[in-house]
Amino acid sequence: MSQVSPPVLRLSHISKRFGSLVANDDISLDLHRGEVLALLGENGAGKSTLVNILFGHYTADAGSVDVDGTPLPPGNPRAALAAGVGMVHQHFTLADNLSVLDNIVIGTESLWQPRQRRRAALARIQDLAARFGLAVQPHAKVGSLSVGERQRVEIIKALYRGARVLILDEPTAVLTPQEVESLFGTLNQLIAEGLAVIFISHKLDEVLRVSHRVAVLRGGRLVATLAAQGTSKPELAELMVGRRVEMPARTTTTASDRVIASLDRASVAAAGRMGLHDISLDLHAGEIVGIAGVSGNGQVALAELMSGMASPSTGRVTLHGDALPAQPRRWIGAGVARIPEDRHAEGAVGDLAVWENAIAEQLSNETFVRAGVIRRAAARRFAGELVSRFDVRGGGIDVPTRALSGGNMQKLILGRALSVRGAETPRLVVASQPTWGLDIGAVAYVHRQLLEAAAAGAAVLLISEDLDELMALSDRIAVMHAGHLTAARPTSAWTLASLGLAMAGADSANRNDAEVAHAA
């Protein structure tokens, strides 16, 4: 990487307000050819706003964006693409029913052109794939591809459009370790050919590994730009949140022989998505069992089954030996705390106030509802205590929940789940992707709460695509692939490599091995 040449990208004095909220405050950054610049910050620090201004989705209130010395017209994504700015979103923007070739080419040719130049497009795609180590099947339907393969298509799509600046938003969030290594190999090739990369991630190990410089945002302001080689994870974490961050980890187990919940050869038919096939698992008091797997392999069905939102089509699921019907109210009443995967769609009603969401799972509790009427004083008192206890920041209990940052919304959901039975500890905590998209400060807080729940005697089912999270917190880990579940083994029996292989389906010999699962 050379810093002698002029920057390929320059953001100068960018500011952006949303009402009284200052999302970006006088931010200036440069990016050079062949450089990876990591962009870090807490949830709500201003990263997304800055990137959306760069890509033309938002118009800055002040400041400018230059690409190769030429000002970029504000609020114009087409102009950003034409200038060579490409973006690979965390949630891919591909059409499942179209081929890889069609997804890449769509939008690059005039509608008035008499016919597509498919042969030339195919040759160019194959050349890009060979140059950058991005193996793809041009004629395969995108819907049939793995997550890693879809990401490769997204990168080729950006390169096909002539990207010179590539924004990667949480690019490893849903990849296996082997796919992460493949991505980093591609990244090395890209920067070797002069591409400039903005790398957005909450995974500080990866940031330090792949980036040349790190820019840290906090509260909408740029608080530091420093060389990656001379910094550390603790320093970056402290810059992000403004205080020292201690990441908790499982040190001693409090698991007992008492089985809280059990799956016995259970299957779930799930229309339109992956179900479950003949899975068995016991969850013990005081134990954290981690479930690894690439997104879409049956984790949603498992979370629904273990929180009373779905019934097994065959087999049994029991709580303290009793088979409960698929009625979430019954499961909550029996001491099950649910932290859903999608905090916005399932975890909270965004237009309701914080205090209303705080009691949303206790509407059958006479403390808060009597004769169909909400007892507002009691509900608001409970919400205030919950907000204080779980450090939910964002304006108090009367603000709309959608106004909270992702981390604070997750704290609200976590607090509600762990407080449903008053002062009692839940018997079972079903936590599905509990730290997805959260900054390191919020992650540390959620981890600490899950560890405390286990220490108090709860069984915790931790479903996560973050392998570092699973390795740090779990007593045992099982892997889901195509609706099947491996035996749950002690965490020490797994490595990141073996987890990655199991996530790719290479561990089928150990599926449904109930004897191994119980012995572990």
Image: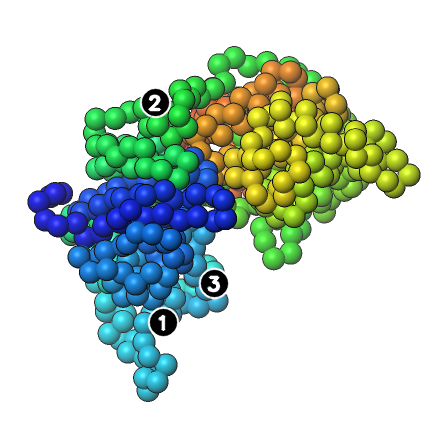
Residue 178 lies left or right of residue 231; in this view the side is: right
Quadrant (top left, top right, bottom left, bottom right) of the N terminus: top left
Closest to the observer: 364 or 297? 364
Q: How is the image coloured?
A: rainbow
Q: Earlier in the sequence, mark 3 or mark 2?
A: 3
- Crowding near the residue tagged with mark 1, few <14, some 14–19, many ≥20 C-alpha atoms within 10 Å: few
| Residue that label 3 marks | 96
Q: Residue at x 41, y 36 (%)?
A: 219
Quadrant (top left, top right, bottom left, bottom right) of the C terminus: top right
How far is the residue under mark 3 from the one under mark 2?
Answer: 41 Å
Query: At label 3, which amino acid type do we have?
Result: Asp
Determine whether the residue tagged by mark 2 lies in a helix, strand or loop: helix
Closest to the observer: 267 or 375? 375
Query: At label 2, which amino acid type do we have?
Result: Pro
Which numbered disc covers residue 234?
2
How far is the residue under mark 2 from the one under mark 1?
Answer: 44 Å
Determine whether the residue tagged by mark 3 lies in a helix, strand or loop: loop
| Residue that label 1 marks | 107
Residue 63 point in image, percent of width and height: 30, 51
- The answer, for residue 275, to whether it is visible in the render is yes
- Crowding near the residue tagged with mark 3, few <14, some 14–19, many ≥20 C-alpha atoms within 10 Å: some
Residue 248, relative to residue 36: is it above or below?
Answer: above
- Crowding near the residue tagged with mark 2, few <14, some 14–19, many ≥20 C-alpha atoms within 10 Å: some
Determine whether the residue tagged by mark 1 lies in a helix, strand or loop: loop
Q: Residue at x 28, y 54 (%)?
A: 64
